Amino acid sequence: MKVTIDREECTSCALCWDACPEVFEENEEDGFSQIVEKFRVDGKPDTGEVPDDLTDCATEAAESCPVEIIEVQ
């Protein structure tokens, strides 16, 4: 499953990385959400490929985002 984050619109509320820390984490430099390194596509912090066993977790995190900046496909 592909996951993308519009990091420029992130409010750093922490709901996604609280809901699914296996996929999302806080960037230490800017405080915004990012994909954990092992799931990143081409090293980009805003784009990832998540394994099937984390689909529900990533979807829950996306649905919890108050500014709706996480897309799962």
Image (spheres, helix red, strand yellow):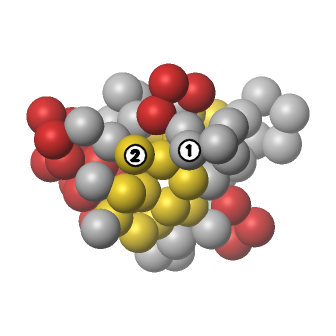
- Residue 52 appears in the rendering: yes
Question: Disc 2 or 1, which lies upstream in sequence?
Answer: 1
Q: Position of residue 14 (x, y in %)?
A: 52, 44
Residue at left offset 62%, top offset 68%: 6
Q: How packed is label 2: few (under 14 Cα within 10 Å), some, or many (20 or more)?
A: some
Q: Could you tell me the amino acid type at mark 2?
A: Glu
Query: Which label is found at residue 71?
Result: none
Residue at left offset 13%, top offset 34%: 53
| Name of the residue lying farthest toward the right | 29
Residue at left offset 19%, top offset 47%: 55
Q: Is residue 46 left or right of residue 27?
A: left
Q: Nearer the viewer, residue 35 or 65?
A: 35
Q: Position of residue 63 (x, y in %)?
A: 29, 65
The picture quadrant where one finds residue 41 is top right
Q: Position of residue 19 (x, y in %)?
A: 32, 40
Which residue is tagged 1?
Answer: 41
Element at badge 1? loop
- Residue 18 appears in the rendering: no
Element at badge 2? strand
The picture quadrant where one finds residue 22 is top left
Q: How packed is label 1: few (under 14 Cα within 10 Å), some, or many (20 or more)?
A: some
* Disc 2 + disc 1, Cβ < 8 Å: yes
Residue at left offset 77%, top offset 28%: 28
Instruction: Name the quarter where the C terminus is drawn.
Output: bottom left
Q: Is residue 51 above or below residue 72?
A: above
Which residue is tagged 2?
Answer: 49
Q: CA distance from mark 2 to mark 1?
A: 7 Å
Q: Is residue 30 left or right of residue 27?
A: right
Q: Is residue 32 above or below residue 8?
A: above
Q: Could you tell me the amino acid type at mark 1?
A: Val
Q: Position of residue 64 (x, y in %)?
A: 33, 60
